[in-house]
Amino acid sequence: MEPTSRSLPKNAYKVLDPGENYVPVVPATVTPREIGPYSVGWGLFFAVLFSAAAAYLGLKIGQVFEAAIPIAIIAVGISTAMKRKNALSENVIIQSIGAASGVVVAGAIFTIPALYILELPTNFWHVFLASMFGGFLGILYLIPFRRYFVKDMHGQLPFPEATATTEVLIAGESGGNQAKTLLAASAIGGLYDFLVTTFGFWKEAFSTRVLPGLDYMADHFRIEFRMNILAAVTGLGYIIGLKYAAIIAAGSFLSWFLIVPVIAYIGDGLMTPLGTGVTTLIRDMDAHAIYFHYVRHIGIGGIAMAGIIGIVKSSKIIGGAFKLAAAEIFGKKGHSVNDAADRTDKDIPMGTIVSLIVVVLLSMFVFFWQSVTGNLGQAFTGLLIVAVIAFLFTTVAARAIAIVGSNPVSGMTLMTLIISSFILVQVGLTGPTGMVSALIIGGVVCTALSMAGGFITDLKIGYWLGNTPVHQERWKFLGTILAAASVGGVIILLNATYGFTGATALPAPQANAMAAVIKPLMSNQPAPWVLYIAGALFALTLESIHIPPLAFALGMYLPLELNTPVLAGGIIAHFVSTRSKDEALNNARRERGTLIASGLIAGGAIMGVLSAGLKFFKINYTDFGWTWPESDGAEFLAMAMFAVIAAYLYWDSMRAKTGE
C-alpha cells in the first residue's frame, strides 16, 4: 500500500548535491496501486472525450487547449467524490493516458485539415494512421531519453506544466493547507481569466499604442510593447524562473525592438512585396505583420539549429541508448538494465523499443506506398524524412516543454513541410500527390513531436510522485490509438457538416497557414532560406557565448505578448526567493509561490476549456456586440488588473513560514 502522508520532498525542484538522491512521494520500496479497471478506464474515457472536444473546438473556433491539467483536476475530483483512498498513483495514470488527447489533437489539426482546404483526396485512414503512427513514434523515440531529462537533469529544467500538474495532484491527495492554497489560487486565477476571455471586462493584452506619443513610435518605427495579462501565463513565468524567463524575453525584445524596426526601415522604400506568398508591401505592414512574415522565420531557424546543437551535445546520451539497445538485443538472453533498476526507474526494454520502432516504420512505409504516393521509391523517401526529422526534433520538443511549457511544434512542422517538399520535388513528387504526401508527412512528424513534448511532462510527473515509468509508457499507446480515432472521426464529421472552405467554413487557422505554405513549395517556389540560415547562425553565436540558444530562439518565435508576462512572473519568483537572509524562509516562500502559480495555471486551464465551450455556443463578449474590450480604457484597466494579480502572487507567496 501507499503511505498516507502526501507532500513533495524538499529537493523536488532543486539541483541535487553530490551524493544526494531524490526519493519520490511514493518511494521505490512501495508497490502502489497504479494499473486497473479504474485508472485505465477513466484514462481512456478522457482520451476520447478530450480528443473530440479539443479537435472540435480547435477547428470550430481556432482555440486549442491543453488537456493535462483539466484531466488531473477532474481525476482528483472523481477520486475524492468516490472516497477512493491512496489514489495518487492511479490519478497519475489517468492523467497520463488521458493527456494523449491534447497532444494528438495538436498534431492533427495543424496539418490534416489542409488536405480539405486544398481539395486534395483524403479519408479517415489518412487522418487516423498519420496521427497514430506519429504518436507511436513520439513515445518510442522519447523513452530512451527519459532518464536523461527527468532524472539526470533533476532541478536543472523548470518543467512548468509538469510542476503545475504535480502540485494539483499532490494537493488533491494531501488536503490541509496545501489544498486550500491551491484551491484559492485556482479560483482567483480561473475567475480572473474567465472574466477576460468570456465577458471582456478588460482587454486580454496591453499595447503601448494607447500611450500618448508611443502610438507614433508604433506607426512610424514599428516599435511596440505588448503584454498578455492572463493570470495563467504569469503563473507559468513564476515556475520557469528568472533565468530562463529573462533569456526568453531577450529573444522577444531582439525580435520586436530591433529586427522588426530595421526591416520596417529597409522595406519602407520597396515598391514590391518581398518574400514568397507575401502580397503586402512592408511599408503597409504593422509590427505584428512584419514579425509574422519575416522575423518568426529567424526564430524557426534558431530552433532548428538549437536542436542540432542539442543532438551534438547529447551525443553521448544518444550513443549510450544505441549501445544499450545493442547490448539487450545481442547480449545475454533475458538480460536488461531494468532487471537491476528500482521500480521507479523501469522502462520498456530497449530491445522491445527498437523492435516496435521497426514495426511502426515498416507499417508506415506500407501506408505511404499503398495509400499516399503509390510509388515504392517515393514512399521510402517519405519514410526516411519522417524517421530522421522526428528523431532529431524529439529532444528539441522535450527540452522546449521542459523550459517554457510550450511546444514550438508549429514551427518545427513548418520546417518539416519545407524540407520534405524540397526533397519530394527532387524525387519527382509534385502536384496534388506531392502536396498530399508532404502534408501527411508533416502530420506524422507534427504529432510525433507534440507527443514527445507532452509525454516528457507525464513522465516527469510520474518521477516526482513515484509512478512506474513502464506502466505510463505501455498504456500511452492505447490512449494514443483512441485519441487518433477520435480526432479522425471529428475531422471527417466537421468537414461533412461545415467544410473547411466556403462561406460556412471552419477557421482552422493553423491548417490554413500550412496550406498557404505548401502550395508554392510544391510549385518549386523558394522558401525563406536566408531567414532560416540567419536564425541558425545566430543560434551558433549564442552557443559560443554560453547563452542557451533554444530558450532565446523560443523567445524569437513565440509572440512578444506571451513572453513579457513570463518575464514578470520570473521577476516575482526571484524577489520572493531572495528577500530574506534566512535561506529556509526563502525556500518556504518559493515553494508556496510555486503552489500559488500552479493554481493560477490550473484555474486558467480549466476555465479556458469552459470559455471555449461557451464561445462555441456564442456566449462570449464578441457575440454580445460589446466594444468596450477594444477601447483604450479596457487596456489601461488590463494593466491595473495585471498589477493586482502580480501583487497577489507576490503577497501570498511572502506569507509562507518555515516548517509549513
Image (cartoon, rainbow, N blue to C red):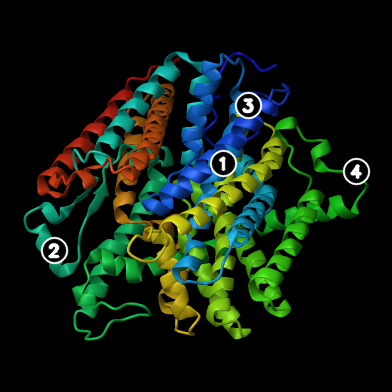
Observer-nearest of 88 and 512:
512
The answer for how far apart the CA atoms under marks 2 and 4 are is: 69 Å
The answer for how far apart the CA atoms under marks 4 and 1 are is: 36 Å
**Secondary structure category for the residue under label 2:** helix
Residue 105: give x, y in percent of width and height: 51, 51
The tag earlier along the polypeptide, 3 or 1, is 1
Residue receiving disc 2: 217
Residue receiving disc 3: 90
> In the picture, residue 45 is in which quadrant?
top right
Q: Residue at x 46, y 34 (%)?
A: 70
Decide: marks 3, 2 in contact (CB < 8 A)?
no
The answer for how far apart the CA atoms under marks 1 and 2 are is: 49 Å
Query: Quadrant of the image for the C terminus?
Result: top left
Decide: marks 2, 4 in contact (CB < 8 A)?
no
Q: Is residue 404 left or right of residue 268?
A: right
Give the class, few, some or many, for how many residues have Cα within 10 Å of label 4's Cα (few <14, many ≥20): few
